[in-house]
Amino acid sequence: MKLNTAELSTTASPHLFSRRKSDWIMQQVIIALVFPTIAATYFFGFRVLLMVLVGVVSSVFFEYAYQKYRNIPSTISDYSAVVTGMLIGLSLPVTAPLWTIVIGTAFAILIIKQLPGGIGRNALNPAVAARVMLKVFFTPWITDWVTPGADAVSTATPLEYIGHFSKSVSAEVPNLMQLFFGFELGGNVGETSKFAIILGLIYLVVRGIINFKIPLLYVVTVAVVTGLYSSFDLTYMMTHVLSGTLIFAATYMATDYSSGPLTPDGKTLFAIGLGVLTALFRILFNFPGGVGFAILIMNALTPVIDRYLAPRIYGHKKRPKVLKTT
């Protein structure tokens, strides 16, 4: 059978089309964030929804306003600003003033995301950078942790009892069951229930949004390092795993496409580096925030990691040589 070339047509790439576009991916992340949002609302009340709403509205506003001012196409329809706003709203205690959320979203969207060029061009995770900035400059307003419930009794986070070279778990720390489900636990609202976060993690993995390797290696590395330090005291190890924002960040922040490595070996090194840094910050100090600093450090190292861990080209025995720049 002869091929009639006259019937063939030439079109520009791409030739493969998929629903896995930015807006669809971000929609899946939003759905996954509903789980910890519901849990936080259950424990801390409807103010959590207000915090998330303020985060989302202000993030979308700052992105739209910036792009309108620059006279560039608006990207608010890709939902990435919505995700950033939700993450910032969930990354603060229920007592945080709403204006701190607005400041955080302004910093995340305008400075970290839009100035470098928008989604896909930010070297740092916007939500993490905003959380660290608020931690550094607005600590008095965002560190008033309270226990869940109507009484809202002021409390310390578990990390304040197991850091600063401690090798044992204080009696003041909630037990592992409470840490897992979020009962009697003070801290940032989104990190309260690890059970709810894991449901979101499973959803993202099943939908093919994230690779399970980064969250798993991150959490396991923290467990191993804290285990080595405590002579493998299981309670001490698991208290570190279930305390703070570790599992929340491992699920929703460490897996960020833009600020994480692209290469397979780079992802492995990235996750292990996160775990080592987080564990060291926690062992050496007694303040919440080690996860954020660890992620930003590894974000900054990502270009170097990808550069030196590029996959071996099929048919070649070695990785591509690093090109020297002048």
Image: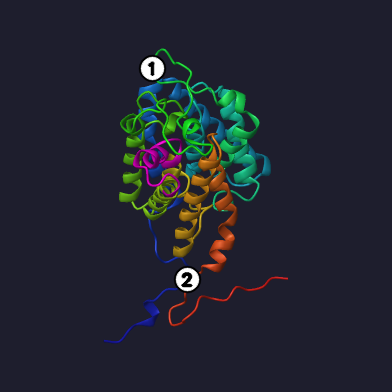
Residue 43 in view of the camera: yes
Which colour assignment does the render follow?
Answer: rainbow
Quadrant in which the C terminus appears: bottom right
Is the N terminus in the top left, top right, bottom left or bottom right quadrant? Answer: bottom left
Residue 140 x, y percent position in the rendering: 61, 24
**Residue tagged by mark 2?**
311
Q: Which residue is mark 1?
A: 149
On whether residue 253 falls in the magenta region, the answer is no
Residue farthest to the top, as pictured: 151
Which residue sits at x=44%, y=63%? Answer: 264
Side (left or right) of 301 relative to 174? right
| 294 vs 36, nearest the viewer | 294
Residue 8 at what x, y percent from top left? Answer: 39, 76
Give the amino acid type for the residue marked by disc 1 in the picture: Gly
Residue with the most extreme right position: 326
For marks 1 and 2, give the CA distance: 51 Å
The numbered mark, 1 or 2, whose residue comes first in the sequence reads 1
Give the extent of the magenta segment.
228-247
